[in-house]
């Protein structure tokens, strides 16, 4: 193999030889992140509760972790599906032990576990005491406790080698969430906690030259979101007839490319502890969404607060 070809392959597969765990990769952002890490050449362990034999409480059997793993492999990486409930410590421990046994290292941990969409529709805008306590606490279990269990269990392996990356996936950035109440107290806590987790882990990973960040997609056209609007990825713009602001939405590919770009950046430590979003990272790294656009949903929402006539087309 010539030097020229070696360089070319390295450019095409900057994450070749890297081991990643995407916790919560059944669908949406998690699936797209896993696939884009695979596109960059990584071996990606993908986890979730919905398999071809079992459907989680989310109630969607149309997407499975096995399918995600196959998509990772088809993209050029190696996908490994491991059914895991990240609220079950024994299952998470077995997962990490398997990665250690099979690979001996972990370079990228993406905490994307959520699965609480079925709990939020009837709770948005309600007072804390008007929300069923079981539902509210379940949001915190799914969006916070899962992340803590996974980090607590996986970080000893990740820190074994210097330079590891931890990505806490959430909804919103410090700039947006910091002065705004996100729908209800339980949801607000669930989506702000990962931002603080990344901030804290950034301090704790310093000894191993690790980097921790939180990353938020914008208005994400996940499978569930598209179904809620009654559209598909192919005709999603039809939904803007009812909700014009949906024009600033983005496909899951966008945040997937954001995380892959971070993972491949040898200078990513400059982001340590920060709250990032797909639009900002697109401007930094030069990638686009699948359709060639560059949405900035959070910029649009901030601008609209001061100018209600802000055109979403100006933020694509």
Image (cartoon, rainbow, N blue to C red):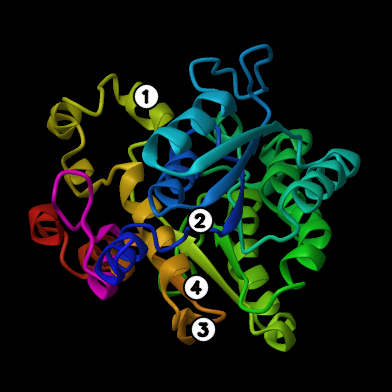
Towards the viewer: 291 or 60? 291
Closer to viewer: mark 4 or mark 3: 3
Tell me how far mark 1 sits from mark 4, CA to CA.
28 Å
Q: How crowded is mark 3: few (under 14 residues within 10 Å), some or many (20 or more)?
A: many
Q: What stretch is highlighted in magenta?
A: 282-297
Residue 104: percent from left, percent from top: 76, 58
- On screen, residue 219 versus residue 148, left or right, reads left
Residue position for label 4: 178
| Image quarter in which the N terminus is found | bottom left
Give the mark nearer the N terminus: 4 vs 3.
4
Please tell me which of labels 2 and 1 falls first in the chain.
2
- What SS does tag 3 mark? helix
Q: Main secondary structure of the magenta part?
A: loop
Residue labelled with disc 1 = 228
Q: How far apart are marks 3 and 1 (CA)?
A: 38 Å
Asked whether residue 289 is drawn in magenta, I would say: yes
| 209 sits to left or right of 60 | right
* Badge 4: residue crowd in 10 Å (few <14, some 14–19, many ≥20): few
The local crowd at label 2, few if under 14, some if 14 to 19, many if 20 or more residues have their Cα within 10 Å, is many
Q: Can residue 124 be seen in this view?
A: no
State the residue position of label 3.
269
Going 40% across and 48% down the picture, which residue do you hit? 36
């Amino acid at each position: 193999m010539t030097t020229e070809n070696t360089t070319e392959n390295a450019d095409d597969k900057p994450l070749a030889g890297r081991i990643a765990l995407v916790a919560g990769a059944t669908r949406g952002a998690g699936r797209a992140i896993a696939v884009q890490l695979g596109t960059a050449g990584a071996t990606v362990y993908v986890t979730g509760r919905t398999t071809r034999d079992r459907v989680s409480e989310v109630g969607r059997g149309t997407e499975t972790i096995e399918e995600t793993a196959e998509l990772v492999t088809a993209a050029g990486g190696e996908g490994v599906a491991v059914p895991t409930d990240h609220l079950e410590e024994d299952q998470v421990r077995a997962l990490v032990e398997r990665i250690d046994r099979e690979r001996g290292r972990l370079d990228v941990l993406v905490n994307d576990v959520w699965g609480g969409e079925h709990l939020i529709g009837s709770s948005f805008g309600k007072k804390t005491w008007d929300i069923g306590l079981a539902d509210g606490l379940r949001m915190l279990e799914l969006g916070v406790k899962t992340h803590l269990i996974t980090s607590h269990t996986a970080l000893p392996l990740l820190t074994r080698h210097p330079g590891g990356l931890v990505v806490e996936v959430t909804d919103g950035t410090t700039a947006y969430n910091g002065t705004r109440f996100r729908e209800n107290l339980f949801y607000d806590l669930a989506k702000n906690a990962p931002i603080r987790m990344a901030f804290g882990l950034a301090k704790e990973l310093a000894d191993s030259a690790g980097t921790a960040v939180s990353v938020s997609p914008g208005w994400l056209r996940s499978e569930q979101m598209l179904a809620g609007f009654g559209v598909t990825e192919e005709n999603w713009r039809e939904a803007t007839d009812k909700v014009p602001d949906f024009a600033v939405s983005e496909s899951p590919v966008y945040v997937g490319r954001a995380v892959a770009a971070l993972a491949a950046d040898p200078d990513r430590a400059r982001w340590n502890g920060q709250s990032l979003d797909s639009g900002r990272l697109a401007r930094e790294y030069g990638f686009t969404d699948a359709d060639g656009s560059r949405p900035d949903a959070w910029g649009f929402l901030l601008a609209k607060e001061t100018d209600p006539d802000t055109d979403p087309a100006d933020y694509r």
